[in-house]
Amino acid sequence: MNAKQPVRSSGGITGLPPRYCSDPTIFDLEQKHLFPSQWFPIGYESDIAGNGEHFSFQLLGLDGFCVRDDHDQLHCFRNVCRHRGTQLCPVNSSGLGTVPEGEPCSDNPTKSSIVCDYHGWKYGLDGRLIAAPHMDNTPGFNRADFSLYPIRCAKWQGIIFAQVGGGQDNPTDSLTEILHPLNRIVEPRGLDQFQRKKTISYVIQANWKLLFQNFNECYHCPSVHPQLTPLTDYRDAENEFDTGPILGGPMRIRDDADSVTRDGDYCGPIPDSLVGEELKKAHYYTVSPGFFLSLFPDYVMVHRLSPLAFNQTKIDCDFLFLPASGLSLPTGATAWEFWDQTNLQDWEMCERVQRGISQGNFSPSPYSPLESLLVKFDQHYRQQIARFE
């Protein structure tokens, strides 16, 4: 039998005024002042395990790539050659459904440099311009002045994050400082040892905040996700974090299921350190503004968000597993097929909310007690954006 249902309250507080999700000028404020200093996940260390390996990414309308240099250091750069602005790395345009992994950039066979296919400009793995054919005698040209544009990056528990800007009006917190509260939950699982096995990408016609609000409540689960109800009780969730950028907590897996998959069975290796009650828990967290982290006994799911417009958000949903140790297990498809169905159900509802609130003359009701985390999300967001309104 499941544990006693937790007691929560929303205090009769109503939802965000619709303009915060339907007014383009609010999104302009976010783009200018809020997003540049925030950390967004872009990939995984295991994606570029060897020196010279690299992947491309898109974040907040910016094309970039991440590379590991010969000294095992990670770097991120804007994906443009300094000569004529040519894209150095192919970038996948993503929509609904499965898309390939980021394609490798052009380089020489030794992976010791990045080479532009257009005019042959060559860059070191640290971004320095090291060769520019027929440019040495060009007046005013100095190779040292044309390194690749850097993008700030950092890593946490095997996940690579990037930050597209910053500034004095919005001071930057370190990634490790922001995510430190999650360490006690992810370190025993060895999250940094997990490897990405599958990515499903979506472009949703809804504001990024609506997606955060949806993820932070299971009030909608009985009516929207009938496949989820046999695996977890929508009322049986704990609010482990209910202030600041991190929200969420564990939800108990029902006694007759092992994991949150299509058939309720395990589909990946279980960390040796995971014992007792932790084997019956699914953990769900959001980190504003670009990261959902879901931990199950046998796999990890990461949603990487990139706001595109006031009514459009790109999401890459990654499925991570420990490397198999000779175990005979399913491929993991029972996890990603289950969550692709669940994601699409969520995205449809978020798009319907977007269309509804964009019609005007709408005032939200008070939140349900099952939506108490939405109160905390709204409060954190309002505190951040209030400085710039």
Image (cartoon, grey):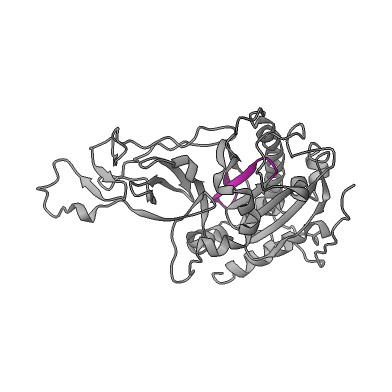
Give how far across and how far down residue 198 sits, in percent: 57, 35
Q: Which residues are magenta?
A: 296-315
Residue 258 relative to residue 38: left or right:
right
Q: Is residue 41 visible?
A: yes
**Which residue is depicted at the point 81% across and 56% down?**
370
**Which residue is depicted at the point 53% across and 61% down?**
176
Examine the structure image and report whether residue 307 is included in the region drawn in magenta: yes
Give how far across and how far down residue 95 sits, in percent: 56, 36
Which quadrant would the C terminus be assigned to in this image? bottom right
Magenta span main SS: strand
The relative height of residue 343 versus residue 235 in the rendered view (above or below) is above
Give how far across and how far down residue 258 sits, in percent: 77, 38
The relative height of residue 102 versus residue 379 in the rendered view (above or below) is above
Residue 285 relative to residue 128: left or right:
right
Specify the farthest residue to the left: 137
Nearest the viewer among 289 and 126 is 126
Examine the structure image and report whether residue 207 is included in the region drawn in magenta: no
**Which residue is depicted at the point 46% across and 36% down?**
92
Q: Is residue 76 visible?
A: no
Residue 226: quarter of image: top right
Give how far across and how far down residue 130 sits, in percent: 22, 46
